[in-house]
Image (cartoon, rainbow, N blue to C red):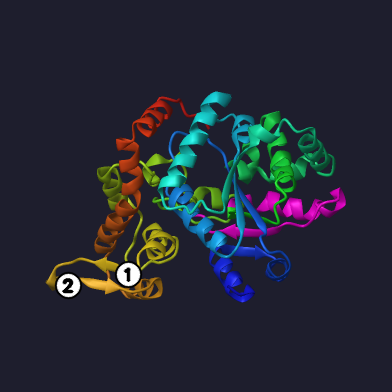
Amino acid sequence: MDVESRLDLIKQVGEEIITEEELRHLLKTKERPIAYDGFEPSGTDIHIAQGILRAINVNKMTKAGINFKMLVADWHAWANNKLSGDLGKIQTVGHYLIEVWRNCGMDLKNVEFIWVSDYVKDPEYWKKVMNVARNSTVKRIIRTGQIMGRKEAEVQQASQILYPCMQCADIFQLKADITQLGMDQRKVNVLAREIGPSLGFWKPIVISHHMLIGLGEIPKTKDADRILELKMSKSKPDTAIFMNDSEEDIKRKISKAYCPAKVIDENPILEYSKYLIFEKFNTIEIKRPEKFGGDAVIENYHELEKLYKEGKIHPADLKNSVFYYLNEMIKPVREKFSKDVKLKKLLETIKRFEVTR
């Protein structure tokens, strides 16, 4: 695959790339660049944005010739007081996350799972953390609070000041040429670009992927933290679809979802069609009675959006189709965790954990 083809594939992942010129140069000069993403094992469920969308994006990156490092950020979740700050429980959830990715279509050939708890034993890592902290102000660090799923005013504990310094240092510890995380992680990645050269490192290329929105309607505001309000969140379980949801749960949640007729902006049902379903299936079939136009086969997202905006597809019909395809994508994970004895026990264990924000 030539450089431009690889670049085009990566651009399908990146809603924003800082910068495209740097990325093109990297692809020309380094045979196997390194990208990373990190995940807090922060709750007892993993939703489709973390599961299915993450697998889709990683697969595109590795197909483009990128070696991918998936960072299981157990110490970060500990610093963020997740699961009541119980590191053992956090690590158990970390193992669950890995098993979900193994079973939801992520091609692991060029993916390496790395635990923060393994490299915190390295004094050189803490030297990087200290240098990040020494070259940043408290105010600047607090402004990155979005990376923890928190607004600035919610950053209260001293450990939550340490968290962004660690995440910035992770990039250099992992020797990552590329940070490939969600748009909500942008601020700390930009911080790494700004201070990296002064610390003797490099400017990582930032490839920020789209954040899937939740199923509920969010009133329009100009809040700087609106991205946190829109994103699918485990803390709002009825507006998120999880990788072990039952068929009945998925149908119930989709049926209640915000999906006004002819409205395409911030419409979660259309979003899931674009970022998930058309990535997995070549077409979407809309089933409906003959008196409402009969069954229709939609061949691409652009066509779906156009028909929906024109009112030629009813919200209920679209919801029924999206429910069907999402359930088909989740079914292999759900079945694996119900039939495999070890995975079933793992899921039952984490379901007993008390979740804290």
In this rendering, does residue 223 appear at all? no
Q: In the rendered image of this protein, does residue 48 appear above or below residue 356? A: below
**Picture disc at residue 294:** 2
Where is 264 relative to 74, above or below?
A: below
Span highlighted in magenta in the image: 184-212
Measuring from the top left, give residue 125's x and y in whole percent. 76, 37
Name the kind of residue labelled 1 in the image: Thr
Q: Which residue is under mark 1? A: 283
Say whether residue 260 is left or right of residue 17: left
Mark pair 2, 1: CA separation? 16 Å
**Element type where label 1 sits in the image:** loop
Q: Residue at x 71, y 64 (%)?
A: 30
Q: Is residue 281 above or below residue 122?
A: below
Q: Quadrant of the N terminus?
A: bottom right
Residue 340 in the image: state x and y as whole percent.
Answer: 34, 35
64 and 157: which one is in front? Answer: 64
Which residue: 29% across, 58% down?
319
Of the numbered discs 2 and 1, the one sitting upstream in the chain is 1
The amino acid type of the residue labelled 2 equals: Gly
Q: Secondary structure at mark 2?
A: loop
Q: Is residue 193 a member of the stretch shown in magenta?
A: yes
